[in-house]
Image: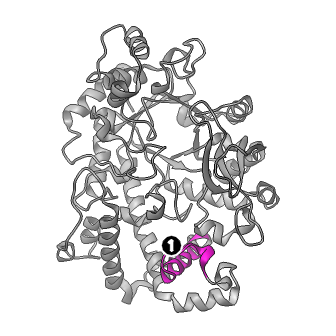
């Protein structure tokens, strides 16, 4: 299969989730500061912006963008209050309440309350004319396949105190059509509100995408392979998942024991019924990939190895040791989503335990994999795929990902003496904690990999305070933000020069 033309030339980009952008509303959003960040990327010679999943976050799951109520919905927390004022939906006076601070950490509880109150006020302001608004009406019709179920799910969840859909009354848990219609009528205003919130989020995001296009910046989105059990997706499409007669998972997702975890990893996501999905031509997945193709220029498939083979753990197990490897949907699946969104460029997240079947699947469909410099300086330099001299052109190189700490902190706290010596020998000069981020950025830029992506934390040379996610920790993740003046013209000029030296300018 031919490689996507996006990967035919060298490019540089930055990794920063929308939540991490500056704003005076407690969390990054799709508004003025996001546009300012896009202009910084253009000034820095970066033609790519990588983000994490845009889906709504679940406070009960640590506000992780990888544990959402929906694989299709946008995150209303990213709606810009400033742009609502600009568009006449809110007034300046509406923003004078007790807003969250603009500090370096997100207080999700405060942000949820603040943004919810603003969205409710915006909804009340437009309600008299909303259903006659042609753009909103068109949006509802074009997105009905997922929006109707999501909006009803969100309204029902509110009506039942935030409880999981598995704890709802049986008639709506089991989707009795008469009961659903009664509840849809009873909650009509709240259902309409959630549709409106999605409309605002998508309108603002698409406006930001146009700003990216105008400045020569493409957006690389992220698509988790699994969905949450407590999601509109599983509630609305139970036959697409491995569930028993009580709609509980039969087996759940995880990872087998390895060097880092003797008990393996128990993720707990419900597994897909790949046989059922194949019989209907992967219709749910096709709809999902089409939705993603409208949100991003490229998409990274998280845990790509699960498409070749996945670790299935019996539901109720205390850890992942009792799981087994099962075959994934492989070629048939990638052919189906490729037909649904032929223009979408895909990156395979191929980190971790990668077996020959994963490599064969990735290479058959000509998908670039990932190389991470934090993994480059251990093991055999002849065999290690992450060390620069072993990179291949059809790949994406990072200093680190959102699951890694910053390069400075990595050097200070995670590397042993031998690994530090390897880095110094590799670059041919003294490397210290205060200089390692720049050295790795330079190595990544110099790599033969077509795409180079640098976390903003490494552009800023941050330490542990800049870590976005620690996979072993359930709480305290996903809160990092950078400040309004942190990325200036001096930084842009430095990285533009670096991109020019290594042939990565747009």
Colour pattern: one colour
Check disc 1 and report the residue beneath it: 139
Instruction: Please give the name of the residue rendered at 41% of the width and 59% of the height, measured from the top-left corner.
Output: 205
Relative height, residue 454 to residue 211 (above, below)? above
Asked which quadrant contains residue 30, the reply is: bottom left
Span of residues in magenta: 146-168
Relative height, residue 172 to residue 463 (above, below)? below
Question: Horizontal placement of 90 versus 424: left or right?
Answer: left
Question: Horizontal placement of 414 versus 55: left or right?
Answer: left
Q: Nearer the viewer, residue 432 or 443?
A: 432
Q: Position of residue 465 (x, y in %)?
A: 29, 40
**Residue 126 covered by magenta stretch:** no
* Image quarter in which the N terminus is found: top right
Q: Position of residue 197 (x, y in %)?
A: 42, 73
Q: Position of residue 160 (x, y in %)?
A: 52, 82
Q: Position of residue 270 (x, y in %)?
A: 67, 58
Question: Horizontal placement of 145 versus 28: left or right?
Answer: right
* Image quarter in which the C terminus is found: top left
Asked which quadrant contains residue 183, the reply is: bottom right
**Residue 158 covered by magenta stretch:** yes
């Amino acid at each position: 299969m031919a490689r996507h033309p996006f990967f035919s030339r060298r490019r540089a980009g930055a990794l920063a989730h929308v939540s991490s952008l500056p704003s005076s509303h407690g969390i990054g959003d799709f508004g003025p500061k996001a546009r300012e960040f896009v202009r910084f990327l253009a000034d820095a010679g970066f033609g790519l912006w990588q983000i994490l999943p845009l889906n709504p976050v679940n406070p009960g799951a640590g506000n992780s963008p990888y544990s959402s109520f929906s694989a299709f919905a946008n995150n209303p927390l990213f709606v810009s209050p400033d742009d609502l004022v600009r568009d006449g939906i809110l007034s300046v006076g509406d923003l004078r309440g007790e807003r969250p601070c603009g500090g370096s950490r997100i207080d999700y509880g405060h942000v949820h309350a603040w943004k919810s109150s603003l969205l409710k006020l915006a909804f009340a302001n437009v309600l008299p004319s909303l259903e006659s608004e042609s753009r909103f009406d068109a949006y509802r019709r074009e997105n009905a396949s997922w929006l109707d179920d999501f909006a009803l799910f969100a309204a029902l969840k509110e009506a039942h105190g935030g409880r999981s859909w598995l704890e709802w009354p049986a008639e709506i848990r089991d989707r009795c059509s008469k009961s659903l219609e009664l509840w849809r009528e009873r909650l009509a205003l709240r259902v309409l509100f959630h549709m409106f919130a999605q409309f605002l989020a998508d309108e603002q995001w698409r406006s930001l995408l146009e700003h990216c296009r105008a400045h020569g910046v493409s957006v690389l989105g992220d698509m988790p392979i699994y969905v949450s059990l407590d999601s509109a997706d599983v509630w609305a499409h139970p036959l697409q998942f491995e569930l028993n007669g009580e709609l509980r998972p039969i087996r759940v997702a995880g990872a087998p024991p390895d060097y880092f975890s003797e008990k393996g990893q128990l993720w707990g996501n419900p597994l897909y019924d790949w046989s059922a999905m194949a019989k209907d031509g992967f219709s749910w997945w096709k709809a999902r990939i089409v939705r993603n193709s409208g949100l991003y220029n490229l998409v990274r498939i998280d845990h790509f190895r699960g498409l070749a083979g996945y670790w299935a753990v019996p539901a109720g197990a205390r850890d992942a040791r009792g799981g087994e490897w099962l075959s994934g949907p492989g070629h048939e699946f990638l052919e189906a989503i490729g037909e649904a969104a032929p223009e979408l460029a895909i990156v395979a997240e191929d980190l971790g335990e990668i077996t020959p079947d994963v490599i064969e699947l990735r290479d058959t469909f000509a998908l670039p994999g990932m190389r991470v410099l934090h993994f480059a300086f251990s093991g055999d330099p002849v065999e290690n795929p992450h060390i620069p001299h072993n990179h291949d052109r059809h790949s994406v190189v990072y200093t680190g990902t959102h699951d890694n700490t910053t390069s400075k902190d990595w050097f200070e706290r995670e590397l042993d003496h031998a690994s530090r010596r390897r880095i110094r020998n590799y670059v041919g000069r003294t490397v210290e904690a205060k200089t390692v981020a720049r050295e790795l950025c330079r190595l990544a830029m110099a790599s033969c990999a077509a795409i180079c992506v640098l976390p903003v934390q490494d552009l800023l040379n941050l330490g542990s305070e800049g870590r976005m996610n620690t996979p072993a920790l359930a709480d305290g993740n996903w809160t990092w933000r950078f400040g309004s003046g942190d990325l200036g013209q001096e930084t842009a000029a430095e990285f533009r020069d670096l991109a020019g030296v290594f042939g990565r300018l747009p």
